[in-house]
Image (cartoon, rainbow, N blue to C red):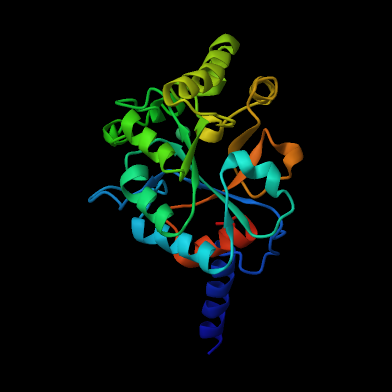
Amino acid sequence: MIIIAIILDIFIILFSLKYAWWYPNLNKNKTRIMMYHMVSDQLDGKKKSGLRVSPEMFEKHLKYFSDNGWKFIKMSELKDYANVPKVVAITFDDGYLDNYTHAMPLLKKYNACATLYLVIDRHNNDWSVKKNPKHNSGVLAEEKKLSDSNIQEMLDSGLFELGGHTITHPYLPNTSLKDKEFEMLECKKILEETFNTKVESFAYPFGIYNKEDVDIIRNSSYDSAVTTREGTSDLKSKYELKRIKASGKDNFFAFKLRVQKGFRGFI
Ligand SMILES: [Zn+2]
C-alpha cells in the first residue's frame, strides 16, 4: 500500500513539474505572441521536431483561440491592443512552404492572421550549422521554403504581414557589427522593395542577441522585435518581446498551459 502511495506521489510530482498546471496564469490583458515555424507532420524515421506543429494541432490551436473569444492581430497592430484582454499574434519564423500550403487555409478558415518573419536567402541554406557546427543533418536545407510568388499571394490575401529575420540567418554572436547592421537593416529594405509592403517588426535569428543588437533595432525604423524567450512582455520592452512557443512535441493540454502561463513546465 505504502509503495503504491509513494509511486503515486512521485508520479504527481513529476507530472506537476512537467506540466505547471498549478503555476499562476499570466495577466489576460497581455498579448500572447505565439511562435511557430512549420505547420507539417513529423518526418518518418526522424527524431520528433518541436519546430513542426501538425496541421491538425495547428487547427486545434486556432479553434481554441476562436472559440474562446481571442482577437487575432498582426505584429504591426500590437501597440493598438496594449492592455486589451485576449489578444493573440500568431508569428511564423523563417519562411517554410507549409506556411502557404497548410497554415494559410486554416488562418482563413478561422478568420485569423499572422506575421511571417522571413529569411531572404532561405533556399538551400542550412543555418542551423551556424549556431552548432555539429548540426549538419541537411534537413533544414532540404525543407521546402516559400517562393516570392507564394509570399505575394499570402500578403495579397490580407492574412499575413512580413517581418524581418535577416538576409542569411546568421549567428549574431559570431558576426561583426558592420555585418549585423547589414543583415538586420538591409533585409527590411529588400522585403519592402520586393513585396511593396511595410516591414515594422524583426525577429532575432535563433533568438540569440545582445545589447548591441537591440540598439541596432532601436535606432532603426523597426517598431518592434521578438525573441524566443518565453512569456509575455510590456510594450516598454518592445525591442525584446517574449513569445509563447508552439512546440510540435506538445499535446493540446501543454499548448493551453503555455497560453495561460507562458510556458509549459520545469522539466
Ligand atoms: Zn529563424
Of the pair 98 and 84, the residue shown nearer to us:
84
Q: Residue at x 56, y 44 (%)?
A: 74
- Residue 256 visible in this rendered orientation of the protein: yes
Question: Going 56% across and 74% down the picture, which residue do you hit?
Answer: 12
Q: Compared to 21, does 42 lie above or below?
A: above
- The quadrant of the picture occupied by the C terminus is bottom right
Instruction: Using the image, determine if residue 250 lies above or below residue 182.
Output: below
Question: Residue 121 in the image: x percent, y percent?
Answer: 38, 22
Of residues 8 and 254, the one drawn nearer to the viewer in this rendering: 254
Residue extending farthest to the left is 44
- Of residues 266 and 100, which is closer to you in this image? 100
Q: Residue at x 53, y 62 (%)?
A: 65
Tell me where residue 222 sits by quadrant: top right
Q: Hey, which residue is sitting farthest bottom in the picture? A: 1
Residue 241 is situated, as x and y percent measured from the top left of the image, at 65, 40
Residue 135 position (above or below residue 174): below
Q: Position of residue 13 (x, y in %)?
A: 59, 70
**In this rendering, position of residue 79 left or right of residue 198:** right
Total count of labels: 0
Instruction: Report x, y in % for residue 48.
Output: 34, 51
Residue at horizontal 59%, vertical 65%? 69
Q: Is residue 248 visible?
A: no
